[in-house]
Image (spheres, rainbow, N blue to C red):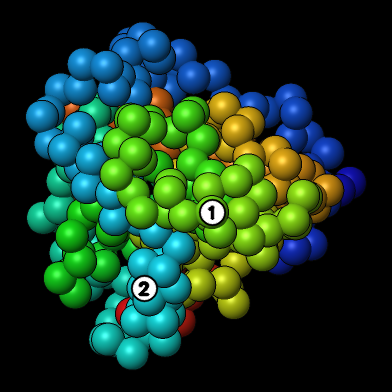
Amino acid sequence: MKNSPSSPDKTPLESLELWEDDLLNRYPDPDAIAQGRAKEAYRNYAEPARDSVREFYRLNHLHQTYDFVQAKRQEFLGFDKREMPVWDAFQFLNQLVDDSDPDTDLDQFQHLLQTAEAIRQDGHPDWFVLVGLLHDMGKVLCLFGEAQWAVVGDTFPVGCAFSDKIVYAEFFQHNPDAHDPRYNTQLGVYERHYGLRNVHMSWGHDEYVYHMVKDYLPEPALYMLRYHSFYPQHRENAYAHLLDAHDRAMFKWVDLFNPYDLYSKSPTPPNWSELRPYYEELVAKYLPPTLKF
């Protein structure tokens, strides 16, 4: 008899093929995850619950340029700021409320736990549960003095035209790249079906956490981490012209993760004291005692 995909004696890469066979039958039910809140109530940017959301995107769309992204990659992807356990990063996230998120005013660690628990309750492999726990850990960039508009929010490619499918796209009219002929065409500095690995995304926590843990998790997990905020693509399909065949195959994992990230937000925080032993063991299974930030 075959081991199930989440059996403890299977490594992530060994179990991946088995789990993928069952994938299409296990897509989550957004209505069930939303716990009584209509899924249409999420991502309400027309009437966000907090005034900070619109101002956040005004600043984000003004400053996220191709040159800005290159500078931030140079500044942060050397991971020379600090070395600490994952749990120290989570302690900081206990204090952070995401100004870009119209759906919750809980601190970020509570959101991570809610996401991870929704994934675990649906019986997915433990590395997928770990993605739920880690996916917003890159917001620790705020610990190093970064403004939220350079850390959180929906992501999008830079170096090519900004899609009108991006939230608050009207704010791009003030972005210098929108008026630069090098960057304001559909392909910009790229080629058709160039592959996302060759495309620079707006700077933020997705890219940061991807590079931080890319040596420890299987590729589907890394796609989830790197592109979970890329709503213009996984919701609107606005950048299909940049994806290659491998991206299209891998994006089903991003699509699988998205409902857990979006619809698990609830005003009721999880009970950390009860969950702590499980998550401490899970983190120790996949990650080293300390990570470089």
Closer to the camera in the image, 86 or 227: 227
Inspect the image, locate mark 1, and give the three-letter code of the amino acid beneath it. Answer: Pro
Dot label at residue 81: none
Instruction: Say if 96 sits above or below 285 in the image.
Output: above
Query: Is residue 9 in view?
Result: no
With respect to residue 88, does 137 lie above or below?
A: above
Residue beneath the point at 28% across and 49% down: 62
Please state if 4 lies on the left or on the right of 276 as rendered.
Answer: right
**Residue lying farthest bottom?**
80
Mark 1 or mark 2: which comes first in sequence?
2
Q: Residue at x 29, y 55 (%)?
A: 63
Question: Helix, strand or loop at disc 1?
Answer: loop
Q: Residue, x 38% and y 32% (percent of image)? A: 169
Q: Say which residue label 2 marks.
A: 72
At which x and y percent is residue 84? 28, 82
Q: Nearer the viewer, residue 185 or 275?
A: 185
Instruction: Say whether residue 63 is left or right of residue 147.
Output: right
The location of residue 164, given as percent across then percent down, is: 48, 29
Residue 16: x and y in percent read: 76, 53
Q: Which numbered disc covers residue 181?
A: 1
Closer mark to the observer between disc 1 and disc 2: 1
